[in-house]
């Protein structure tokens, strides 16, 4: 299947700092990218959907000013967690798809805020 | 998108077929059935999807009942590496992918 790469795989940051996570589609043009968050022993929760060149659409309860999403090209989307706090510690996962095809997922980024 | 119901957990002996059920009784005519799996601490992996016909690929087979209200994912010869959480998702093409609780499959030696 298609390859979606996330970077970094894990990151530890201090409370109050910002962290940027990258999501790249390596062998296809991702017209739509999705960002999910997964807490321990829970399922993936959709945070936002972004189409290339457009503003992201956030799910209810997800603060758009805290979780900044940029999808400036057909192969790259970034999620920036601003002013991170310990409760933001989680497993963040992106996925990408071309048109209406099935979505492929990155390997995830484990964020720990200390 | 239609809601799905899956058993929370299942066990399977290594080398045997693993049959994972999914109920989607409110599925509508233009909704596809997708299966993904998530191995611990990794992103979900696409397995297979279908609309109404049975599908098979190198990973698994998908059997969809005639009324489309349920489906079964079949891993023909389960290995220890197939231990994962399996998600059945029903969605209209083009909609986002939303995950339920899934089935935790444990393949035992």
Image (cartoon, coloured by chain):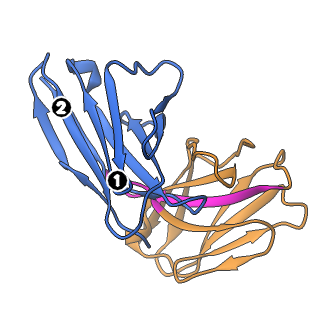
Query: Residue B39 versus residue B91: which sits nearer the camera?
Result: B91
Marked residue chain, label 2: A
* Location of residue B56 in the rendering, given as x and y in whole percent from the top left corner: 64, 81
**Residue sitting at 72 percent across and 41 percent down?**
B3
Task: Please determine whether, in this image, residue B9 is positioned above or below residue B14.
Answer: above
Q: Residue at x 21, y 50 (%)?
A: A7
Chain identifier for the blue-coloured part of the image: A
**Tags 1 and 2 touching, CB below 8 Å:** no
- The verdict on residue A15 being magenta is no
Image-quadrant location for residue B69: bottom right
Disc 1 secondary structure class? loop
What chain is tagged by disc 1?
Answer: B
Residue at the limit of the structure toward the front, as seen here: A53
Q: Position of residue B31 (x, y in %)?
A: 76, 54
Q: Nearer the viewer, residue A20 or B83?
A: A20
**Residue bearing the label numbered 2:** A19
């Amino acid at each position: 299947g298609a390859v979606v790469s996330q970077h970094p795989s894990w990151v530890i940051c201090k409370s109050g700092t910002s962290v940027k996570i990258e999501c790249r589609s390596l062998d296809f043009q991702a017209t739509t990218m999705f960002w999910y968050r997964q807490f321990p022993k829970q399922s993936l929760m959709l945070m936002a959907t972004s189409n290339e060149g457009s503003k992201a659409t956030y799910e209810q309860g997800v603060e758009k000013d805290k979780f900044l999403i940029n999808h400036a090209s057909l192969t790259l989307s970034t999620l920036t967690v601003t002013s991170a706090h310990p409760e933001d510690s989680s497993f963040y996962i992106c996925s990408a798809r071309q048109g209406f095809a099935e979505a492929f997922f990155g390997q995830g980024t484990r964020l720990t805020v200390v | 998108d239609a809601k799905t119901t899956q058993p929370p957990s299942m066990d399977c002996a290594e080398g045997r077929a693993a049959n994972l059920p999914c109920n989607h009784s409110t599925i509508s005519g233009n909704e596809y059935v997708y299966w993904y799996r998530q191995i611990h601490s990794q992103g979900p992996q696409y397995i297979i999807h279908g609309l109404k016909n049975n599908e098979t690929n190198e990973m698994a087979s998908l059997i969809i009942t005639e009324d489309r209200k349920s489906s079964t994912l079949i891993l023909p010869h389960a290995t220890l590496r197939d231990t994962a959480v399996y998600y059945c998702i029903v969605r209209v093409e083009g909609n986002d992918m939303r995950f339920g609780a899934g089935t935790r499959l444990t393949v035992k030696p």
